[in-house]
Structures are given as structure tokens and as C-alpha cells.
Amino acid sequence: MATRIDTTAGRAALDAARTALAAGERPARSDYATAVRYLLQLLDEKAPGNSVEVRVPPFGAVQVVQGPRHTRGTPPNVVELDPATWIAVATGSETWDDAVEAGRIQASGMRADLTALLPLRY
């Protein structure tokens, strides 16, 4: 992650995004982006490494989890999910398994199951 998000700003954006999502509304783009990136930052802090790429388009991606370093092309361990699903599983309002079963998470590779890392403490 290029720029570190301050905890206060990250929590404020996350609260705003969760409130909007709970009301069935789309969060303000700046709140949505900051909330997603803040949670990706927390995941990176919790599980530093380069063996799994977590993608939350269009807002961010991060490589995490110790293991073989990936440097070129598509990584062998990839997780991709939409922003609302990322916020839900990262905060614990939805389980990883439920989101995978519902088809909202695409995960490939032996290390791509993030169950043991979620939810995050924010």
C-alpha cells in the first residue's frame, strides 16, 4: 500500500461506508475507497508477505501471507471480491465461507483461504 491511512480516518470512512451499506445505499466514493484500503492495510499488517494477492477492484490490492514470493504475471494465489463483500468479511458481519458459497469471493490457489485471518481488528 502506497500511502498509510491514519487509524482515525480509516475508522471514520469505514463507519460511514458500513452505515450506507446497511441502509441499502452506495457509500460516498471517497469513504468506500478509504474503508477498503484501510482494511487491506490492516490485513497487510496482520499477515505480511507476498504469496497471496487480495484484489478489491476498483479500490485496491495487496499481497499478503508468508510464502513463496510472486513477482511476474498472475499470482498463483489470488482472492478477488467486490468492496461491499470485502468490508463484510473483513469486519466479521459475514463469514468467509458464506461469501464464497454465495459466489461473491473468487479465490484460487492453496493459500487463498483467508478464514484464519478474518475478521480484522479495526
Image (tube, rainbow, N blue to C red):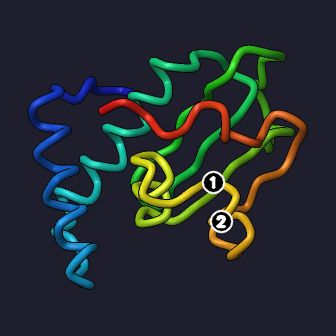
Q: Is residue 108 left or right of residue 66?
A: right
Asked if residue 22 is positioned above or below residue 78 in the image, the reply reads: below
Quarter residue 115 falls in: top right
Local crowd size for mark 2, using a 10 Å CA cut-off: few (<14), some (14–19), many (≥20)? few
For the residue pair 88 and 75, the one nearer the viewer reads as 88
**Residue drawn 24% across and 47% down?**
34
Residue 39 in the image: x percent, y percent?
Answer: 38, 39
**Residue drawn 19% across and 72% down?**
20
Q: Is residue 78 left or right of residue 54?
A: right
Asked if residue 53 is positioned above or below residue 57 in the image, the reply reads: above
**Residue drawn 58% across and 61% down?**
81
Instruction: Kindly report the distance in space between the C-alpha atoms of the residues bearing marks 2 and 1.
Output: 6 Å
State the residue position of label 1.
Answer: 96
Residue 118 in the image: x percent, y percent?
Answer: 54, 38
Quarter residue 16 falls in: bottom left
Local secondary structure at mark 1: helix
Q: Is residue 95 left or right of residue 88?
A: right
**Residue drawn 50% across and 19% down?**
46
Quarter residue 64 falls in: top right
For the C terminus, give its image quadrant: top left
Residue 29 in the image: x percent, y percent?
Answer: 21, 65
Mark 2 and mark 1 residues within 8 Å of each other at the beta carbon: yes
State the residue position of label 2.
Answer: 98
For the residue pair 106 and 122, the one nearer the viewer reads as 122
Inspect the image, locate mark 1, and give the three-letter code of the amino acid beneath it.
Answer: Trp
**What is the number of callouts on the image?**
2
Local crowd size for mark 1, using a 10 Å CA cut-off: few (<14), some (14–19), many (≥20)? many
Local secondary structure at mark 2: helix
Inspect the image, locate mark 2, and give the three-letter code of the amino acid beneath it.
Answer: Asp
